[in-house]
Amino acid sequence: MADGDTPADIYADSFCRLPMPDRETMDDRSKAAYDRLADPNTQSRVGLQGPGTIQLHSNKVSEHSSGLNRYLRTEAGFDEDVLELAILVAAREMDSKFEWAAHEPAAIDAGVPAETIDVVRFKKPTDGLSETETLIIEFGRQLFRERRIDADRYAAARALFGDKRLVDFVILITQYSATALVLRAFDMQPKAGLDYNLPVEEV
């Protein structure tokens, strides 16, 4: 177990409430998933410390979840700035420091303006943002806060994305909200080297 200020039920090898999966006991597909997470040249932003490692304890969950994640991030056709802004909105609304820290650098690299990121980070009004940025942020805020999307906002999102990509967009933000809950349940600890600068009200 970990020491110091880390909770007593956290494993030192995985930084969460489950131990690091044993690669040698995995089937071939799970070994391949493990190796993708461990490879610094793959798409994983957090490697073996993150949701992917938790999911490896259930090989079918890992297989299907990683496949969906890969599709949404690399095959659905979202521009990188749209993709990363949507993920930040989900992270912000779920108060997910881990996801925010993992994806804020990616959003910056994708060209999301610092002012837009701060609107999301500090829950500011969207005045002055582009039409697309405003729609992504306000859509996410309404869905997570009110558990609904009003007719006008839905129509605007459908006009922007089209039917297929609108489905992909909604699945994207809800997938990352689900991941936030997984990280909470298993108490994933902060990853060294990431900047945890998302203000949240601790309970």
Image (tube, grey):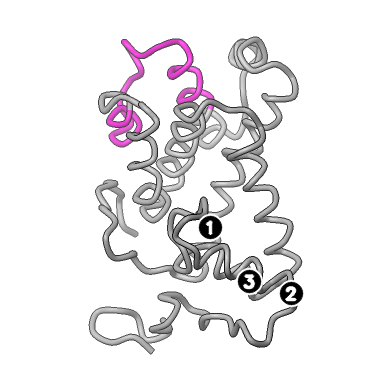
Q: Which residues are magenta?
A: 117-139
Most extreme residue toward the front is 41
Describe the element under mark 2 as helix, strand or loop: helix
Q: Is residue 104 left or right of residue 80?
A: left
- State which tag comes first along the sequence, 1 or 2: 2
Nearer the observer, 100 or 9: 100
Q: Residues within 10 Å of mark 3 (few under 14, many from 20)?
A: many
First-in-chain label (3 vs 2): 2
Say above or below: 182 vs 68. below
Q: Which residue is mark 3?
A: 56
In space, the residues marked 3 and 1 are separated at their CA atoms by 16 Å
Residue at left 38%, top 47%? Answer: 100
Residue depth check, mark 3 versus mark 2: number of the one nearer the observer: 2
Between 66 and 18, which is closer to the camera in this rendering? 66
- Assess disc 1: are there few (<14), some (14-19) or many (≥20) residues with their C-alpha within 10 Å of its C-alpha: some
Question: How many other residues sit within 10 Å of disc 2, few (<14), some (14-19) or many (≥20)?
Answer: few
Callouts 1 and 2 close, C-beta under 8 Å:
no
Figure check: 32 above or below 108: below
Q: Amino acid at mark 2?
A: Asp
Residue to which mark 2 is pinned = 28
Compare residues 147 and 39 and report the one nearer the observer: 39
Report the Cα–Cα distance between label 3 and label 2.
Answer: 12 Å
